[in-house]
Structures are given as C-alpha cells and as structure tokens.
Image (cartoon, rainbow, N blue to C red):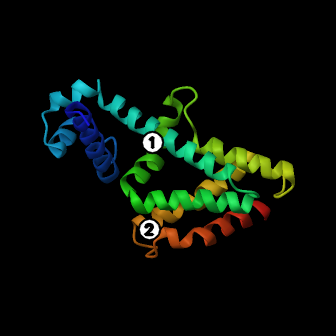
Amino acid sequence: MRKAARTKARIERTALALFAEKGVDQTTIRDIAEGAGIAEGTIYRHFASKEELIAGIFAENYGALAEELDSLQAHHDGIAEKLEAMAGRFFALFESDRDLFRFLFFVQHGQLEKLPPHTGNVVAVIRAALEEAMARGEIPRRDPDLATAWVFGAVTQPAVFRIYGRIATPLTALVRETAAACLGLLRG
C-alpha cells in the first residue's frame, strides 16, 4: 500500500473511532488529525471537508454491507433462513467492528439521502426480501416499509443494549433467537 493510501486509511479509521465515540457533530478535523498523528492540512489533501469524509466512509461501507446482505439472502431459501443469515451478518459486524457498526447505523439518518445513485442500500435489501416472502405467502401481506422497520429495529436495538451493557452475551450467540423474533413480528 502506498504511503498516501495508508495515510487516507489511517484518517478514515481514526475518524470512524472518533465518530463512534464522540458523535459526528462533536468530532472536529483537529480531533481526527491529533488521533491520526498528522497535521490538519494532511486531512484536506485527502478530503475537501469533514462532510466529504463522513459521506465517503458511509457510502463505501454501507454499500458494501448492502451487497453482502443481498448476496447472503440470495443464497438462502425461505424468509426464516434469509433473516437468520442477515441478522448473523449484522451481529458479526457489530462484534468484529463496533465502531463501524455504530457509525453506519447511528449516522444513517443524515447520510442515506446523500448516497450516490446505485449505491447498495441495506434497508432496500431487507425490504425486497420481505416483499418476496409476502408474494410467496411465507408471511402475511402488509406495508413492506413497516415490516422492514420491525426487522431493522429487532436487529439494531440489541446492539444498542449491548453497547450500554444491558446485554452481556455476544450478539453472535443471539442470531437464531433474534431471527425467530423477527419472524414472529412478521407473522404476528
């Protein structure tokens, strides 16, 4: 990896950790520079602004996660298996890279509308899988956006509880139970 690419990666990783710890709004370019051990000007050689840095990290990682989820769900039959595979990926991401998980799901509200066209979208992947399950009669027909919100909440809220110490068990051990709860919501 070239020096410029290594520096850019260090900036992104430092920013990600600070965004997860302090929040996007409370993190300054100075904080990122100090954390990465570089001058503030170095950041501006790679990113025009903090907003560009945020948008770039979000688009790259959110799109990649959406592609992974879409591939996972496509390789499983039935909504129960699809939900388990997708919940497993969410929880594996949380346990392996908590900063990235927190960043993606806690800043999405300000970033989704900024995604470049044709960037993968996690919500759209879940929605499509649920619509297919409704069409096949696996789950009752209902508003697909509401159903997506139920699944999304059932998967992200355990992470919030784990962050705050209310759930001590690693989330990867709770995949089946969470997928079953999602299925119960959808069938209920």
Q: For the N terminus, which image quadrant?
A: top left
- Of label 1 and label 2, which has the lower sequence position? 1
- Mark 1: secondary structure: helix
Q: Is residue 100 left or right of residue 131?
A: left
Residue 147 in the image: x percent, y percent? 71, 52
- Residue at the location (43% across, 76% down)? 168
Residue 66 in the image: x percent, y percent? 56, 43
For the residue pair 90 and 110, the one nearer the viewer reads as: 90
- Residue at the location (59% across, 49% down)? 69
For the residue pair 154 and 177, the one nearer the viewer reads as: 177
Q: Quadrant of residue 79?
A: bottom right
Residue 167 in the image: x percent, y percent? 46, 73
Q: Which residue is at the far bottom? A: 168
Q: Residues within 10 Å of mark 1 (few under 14, many from 20)?
A: some
Above or below: residue 96 compared with residue 19: below
Circle 1 residue = 61
Q: Is residue 98 left or right of residue 105?
A: left
Which of the two marks, 1 or 2, is nearer to us in this view? 1
Residue 156 shows in this picture: no
Above or below: residue 100 compared with residue 177: above
In 3D space, how far apart are the residues under numbered discs 1 and 2 (Cα atoms)? Answer: 22 Å
Residue 114 shows in this picture: yes
Circle 2 residue = 162
Residue 126 in the image: x percent, y percent? 66, 48
- Residue at the location (52% across, 73% down)? 173
